[in-house]
């Protein structure tokens, strides 16, 4: 069983014509998994619907509590990319679990999104990596302790690159 916790972020953003802007909508992952014929046993729990820049220490503690309380050894967290590594660092030290954070640079609701690839990659990673905390983005696995988001490049890199 893979526990999937959603927190919002770009992956869950949808376009509202009346407002001419993107807002965080319902979690995209249940439809994504169904439409892509994913049969790995999983359960999805929406923890919050926030842009990651709006996440507080209390939010990160709630995410940590949910992950720690899970009866699954495999946990996937969908998260906004701007502070994904901060939350990853907050999840360090939860014993006996493989925890993978992923998200998207473009909303899952747009055609050119990286969301489906990232989620599929993260699902494979959470099932094969040893216990620990990881960021899985764009075909690469990162340690949140030594990773930063390269906003200009639209990707994650090792700190100092």
Image (cartoon, rainbow, N blue to C red):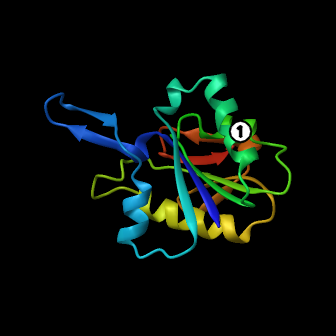
Residue 63 falls left or right of residue 108: right
Q: In percent of the image, x 86 and y 51: which residue is there?
A: 95
Decide if residue 159 is in sight here. no
Q: Which residue is drawn at 28% across and 53% down?
A: 110
Residue 130 as seen in the image, left or right of residue 14: right
Look at 57% across and 65% down and name the residue there: 42
Across and down, in percent, residue 37 comes to 41, 76
From the image, tell me which residue sits under label 1: 64
Q: Residue furthest left?
A: 18
Position of the N terminus by quadrant: bottom right
Residue 78, compared with residue 150, is above or below; it is: below
Residue 32 on image: x %, y %: 39, 63
For the C terminus, the quadrant is top right
* Crowding near the residue tagged with mark 1, few <14, some 14–19, many ≥20 C-alpha atoms within 10 Å: some
Q: In this view, does 20 lie to the left or right of 109?
A: left
Q: Which of 65 and 24 is in front in this view?
A: 65
What residue sits 67% from the left and 42% below the top? 66
The percent position of residue 68, horizontal first and vertical second, equals 76, 45
Q: Is residue 138 visible?
A: yes
The number of numbered badges drawn on the structure is 1
The quadrant where residue 87 appears: top right
Give the secondary structure at mark 1.
Answer: helix
> Residue 121 sits in which quadrant?
bottom right
Front residue of 60/135: it is: 60
* Image position, residue 24 (x, y; %): 36, 37
Instruction: Please tell me in which quadrant of the rendered image residue 147 appears.
Output: top right
């Amino acid at each position: 069983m893979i526990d999937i916790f959603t927190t919002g972020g770009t992956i869950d953003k949808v376009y509202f014509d009346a407002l001419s802007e993107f807002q965080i909508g319902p979690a995209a992952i249940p439809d994504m998994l169904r439409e892509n014929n994913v049969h790995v046993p999983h359960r999805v729990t929406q923890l919050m619907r926030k842009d990651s820049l709006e996440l507080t220490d209390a939010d990160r503690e709630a995410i940590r509590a949910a992950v720690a309380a899970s009866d699954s050894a495999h946990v996937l967290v969908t998260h906004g990319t701007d502070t994904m590594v901060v939350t990853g660092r907050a999840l360090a030290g939860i014993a006996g679990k493989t925890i993978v954070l992923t998200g998207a640079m473009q909303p899952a609701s747009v055609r050119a999104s990286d969301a489906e690839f990232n989620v599929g990659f993260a699902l494979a990673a959470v099932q094969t990596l040893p216990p620990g905390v990881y960021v899985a983005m764009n075909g690469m696995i990162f340690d949140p302790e030594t990773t930063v988001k390269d906003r200009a490049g639209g990707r994650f890199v090792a700190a100092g690159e």
